[in-house]
Image (cartoon, rainbow, N blue to C red):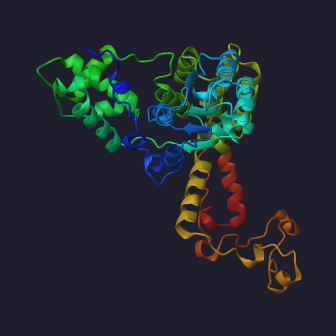
Amino acid sequence: MNNTPLAERMRPTRLEDLIGQEHLSLPSSFLHKALKSGNVPSLILWGPPGVGKTTIANIIANEIKAPFYTLSAISSGVKDIREVIEKARFQQGVILFIDEIHRFNKSQQDALLGAVEKGTIRLIGATTENPSFEVNSALLSRCQVFTLNPLGKAELEAMMKQALEKDVELKKKRVELQEIDALLRISGGDGRKLLNLLEIVIDGINEDLSVITDEKVMQIAQQKVALYDKSGEQHYDIISAFIKSIRGSDPNAAVYWLARMIEGGEDVKFIARRLVILASEDIGNANPNALLLATNCFEAVKIIGYPEARIILSQCVTYLASSPKSNAAYMAINQAQAIVKETGNLSIPLHLRNAPTKLMKDLNYGKAYKYSHDFPGNFVAQEFLPDEIKNTKLYDPGENARENELRKYLSSKWKGKYGY
């Protein structure tokens, strides 16, 4: 019996066999061409868990027959980086793969910079976080960034079908996938997690014909799949419960999920960044101080770090959960972007245009514009939207004390326009 997990047994060894990342695997793609030429640059692979980041790194190393070293940012430090760089001085084309590179601090990333710049190593970094925020700009500028797409239902089904048809161990068993919703739901779009769960369920049923149903999956998963572990397997599930608890104004649940993340070793900046986003998306102008506190929280935890950062996070979390909620600003920008995508670049009204030259003035650029501060109350009614979408209401203040004041102000000025 092969004790290697199913996901590892099914890991593709060719770029063409990768499921769900056609923009990287097709012969016309940059990565495919670079791989075939052997001229692969340093790169950052950005995407959700279980979509192929580690697989791509392994494929590159195998394809170009390069010396391949792996480090995990969770357990490695500057000493480990320097050891690999020293070995690379005596080898050609060394690839260093760093999983969860976003967890490396500035000094650890700086330790890579010189070797990447000189070509001593080719760096492949994998991250679930936006590299623009988590990778030093100097290091990022020397790497090509590839975004990996989340796996959809079709891709996940294809992975399971492929495993049942091709894996030597599973081919020995009779399996009927009667229902798959629970498998997909528990795995959360993580291909590695899905395949390993599939194998656990089949082993758990252990019958001549393993008929997989949602009920059996849930029963076996509850018995054999850990609800949380320190490797961050439920990274996205925990943060989802955390955000939804704050949005739902439950400081008790919010601080509980915060504790789960802290005890699970979650990156303090990841938590704090989500709080900054939530402060605008879910609270907004219902309590403008929420964004100020969340921003200060982010800056503070970067300086303090664990363990004391937990206190700062707790203060921010309980405050945000206890604040009045409004998603009006979030909805406004969503609607505005939808209009822009639908209508394209509408003409800017002449009276709003800048007129730095005589020709522009002759063309009436800015001619009919009314300077608000020249009028009583620093306001005068005029049209600011393109003619095609004039009178379109995008911002609808929420039903809370602060935004009701904004609504009253807008109503007093616009007197019915936009529905205020």
Q: Does 83 sit left or right of 13 as displayed? A: right
Q: Position of residue 24 (x, y in %)?
A: 48, 47
- For the C terminus, the quadrant is bottom right
Q: Nearer the viewer, residue 175 or 353?
A: 175
Looking at the image, can residue 217 be seen? yes
- Which residue is at 53% across, 21% downward? 257
Query: Is residue 325 something one can see in this rendering?
Result: no
Position above or below: 210 against 143: above
Q: Position of residue 175 (x, y in %)?
A: 17, 28
Q: How many numbered discs?
A: 0
Quarter of the image for the N terminus: give it. top left
Residue at image x 55%, y 38%? 46
- Is residue 86 rendered to the left or right of residue 33? right
The picture quadrant where one finds residue 177 is top left
Q: Which residue is farthest left?
A: 208
Q: Relative to the observer, which residue lies in front, 291 or 27?
A: 27
- The image quarter containing residue 180 is top left
Residue at image coords 71%, 42%? 141
x then y, percent, for residue 41: 61, 41
